[in-house]
Amino acid sequence: MIDQNKGLKDKFLTSQQVVGKFGITYQTLCYYTDIGLITTAEKRGHKRYYDSAHVASRLTRIKDMQSRDYSLKSIRGEILKEEG
């Protein structure tokens, strides 16, 4: 369980922590989660936990593709295609 393991506390972040650490809005995080660009590592009640490394790599990838004028729909398609 996330709360009982100190090592996992650094690896997993709440929505609020993701917003603060990566400088995105809560609405953006929720939207990216809803459309499958970012996945939750665990959900407990109404609280979502995210893998810090996953979020960092995905946001880097999303920002890179957006800078090359990819739409979110295209980004989603590429990411889902890569995941197989």
Image (cartoon, rainbow, N blue to C red):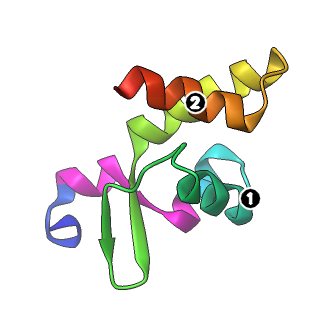
Mark 1 or mark 2, which is nearer the start of the sequence? 1
Going 43% across and 83% down the picture, which residue do you hit?
46
- Disc 2, SS: helix
What amino acid is at disc 2?
Answer: Gly
User: Residue furthest toward the top?
Assistant: 68
Going 42% across and 77% down the picture, which residue do you hit?
47
Going 19% across and 50% down the picture, which residue do you hit?
7
Image-quadrant location for residue 64:
top right
Residue 57 showing in the rendered view: no
The Cα–Cα distance between marks 2 and 1, rounded to whole angstroms, is 23 Å
Which residue in the structure is indicated by mark 2? 77
In this rendering, position of residue 64 left or right of residue 4: right
Counting every numbered tag in the picture gives 2
Q: Which image quadrant: the C terminus?
A: top left
Query: How far across and how far down the image is residue 18, in percent?
Result: 55, 54
In front of the other: 2 or 58: 58
Query: How far across and how far down the image is residue 72, in percent?
Result: 72, 37
Which residue in the structure is indicated by mark 1? 25
- Disc 1, SS: loop
Query: How far across and how far down the image is residue 70, in percent?
Result: 78, 23
Q: Which residues are magenta?
A: 7-17
* Contact? badges 2 and 1 (CB < 8 Å): no
Note whether 70 is above or below 25 in the view shown: above
**Label of residue 35 in the image:** none
In front of the other: 49 or 74: 74
In front of the other: 73 or 64: 73
What amino acid is at disc 1?
Answer: Thr
